[in-house]
Amino acid sequence: MSFHWRSVETNDLRRYISNLQLMGCPDRTIRAIVLAEVEKLFWAKTLEHVRPYADPWQNELRRLGRKAQPQRARALSAEKLALLRELLGPETPDVVNEDMMGIFEATGIVGYLPEKKSKQIISLIDRYAQETQELRDDADNILLDEDRDRMAEMEKGFKDKLFSLLDPAEFEELACRAQLEAGPPGVHLDGVEMTGAELRQLCQLSRSVTDVLRDPWEPWEDRMRESPEKEQRGKEFQGKVAALLGEGRRTDLERAQDPKFRETYSFTRDHDLPKAKAVSLFEARLAIEEQAKELKADRSLSSDERETALLVLNDAAVQRLSTLLGPEAAKSYFENRSDWLEQLMPKKTETPEAGR
């Protein structure tokens, strides 16, 4: 009687394991087969969740996806680990359970492609990233001409394979989505409102500075080294961004370059507060910092007077920020984001112990 693998393989993973055990399959092989099947199952589950938000050029969909993905990623992560432990034993370590948020980000980039093709693209990217990293590791990041030649061959092979898998329109979409995931080089856009069409155009423009599909294979020291050409490309890109956004959003663009605003905007977004609240909170911080600076520079004040004035300012600042944020958000802000306020206050000096 001839053997047919279909008599062993089944979609029921528990029965599949039993069939493998009955035919004397080694535990290591069973484990590898089960891991592969679970990866396949959860890739499909992740795609199922990502596809409703698969068009990043639709602002509403992108915003909904950004809010929903972390929670869904955690849920799928727990579900996946529970299944693996049920199938392979409770000792199955957490490291088997891959970073599901990373999978969500990857599927978000290729979510517009059919499932088979999307898996091929992710596998291709992972393989070439690993090979080029191994080359850099072997060279201790000191690349000789022959290493660079080999890197160029790898890049060509990667792009040739990409072009063989994707038609021109699919490749262009992949390039834009990869740029979107990496973010525009040298320009921050936190709180800058853009249409989907503008965002796509921005991603296309950013490839003149850093092409994400090419630069992961660029030698590390070349990426870190500023050259006049790279600096000029960056300035030209920044000018194009300003032109794209127009005069009406110049203030938003300038504000987004301030790390203090980006920190503030991140906090308000995490707490589902509107952009206007981020702007008000940022402006309040600047005003408080300026007042503290003036008090510290005022030589007409004695040390005690200065300390008293700073403490009064601190109380007023806490009241102002609490009113601005509301009780719940204010509590989180003072617990996690108010280091800057504490640094404005006078340093407490320790009183020497008696007899010393």
Image (cartoon, helix red, strand yellow):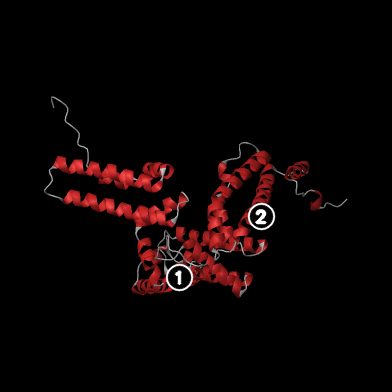
Residue at position x 41%, y 42% from top? 327
Residue 98 - label: none
Q: Position of residue 266 (x, y in %)?
A: 42, 53
| Residue 127 visible to an observer of this rendering | no
Residue at position x 19%, y 52% from top? 294
Residue type indicated by callout 2: Ala
Residue 140 sits above or below residue 337 on the image: below
Give the residue at the far top of this rendering.
355
Residue at position x 17%, y 44% from top? 306
Residue linked to disc 2: 44
Q: Secondary structure at mark 1?
A: helix
Residue 175 sits above or below residue 41 on the image: below
Q: Secondary structure at mark 2?
A: helix
Q: Position of residue 105 (x, y in %)?
A: 55, 57
Quarter occupied by the C terminus = top left
Residue 206 - label: 1
158 or 90, nearer to the observer = 90
Q: Are marks 2 and 1 in contact (CB under 8 Å)?
A: no
Q: Position of residue 72 (x, y in %)?
A: 58, 49
- In the displayed structure, does residue 244 sit left or right of residue 158? left
171 or 61, nearer to the observer = 61
Residue 53 sits above or below residue 41 on the image: below
Q: Residues within 10 Å of mark 1 (few under 14, many from 20)?
A: many
Q: Position of residue 212 (x, y in %)?
A: 49, 66
- In the displayed structure, does residue 311 sit left or right of residue 138? left
| Residue 201 visible to an observer of this rendering | yes
Residue type indicated by callout 1: Ser
Give the residue at the far right of this rendering.
1
| Measured Cα–Cα span from mark 2 to mark 1 | 32 Å
112 or 30, nearer to the observer = 112
97 or 241, nearer to the observer = 241
Q: Quadrant of residue 139?
A: bottom left
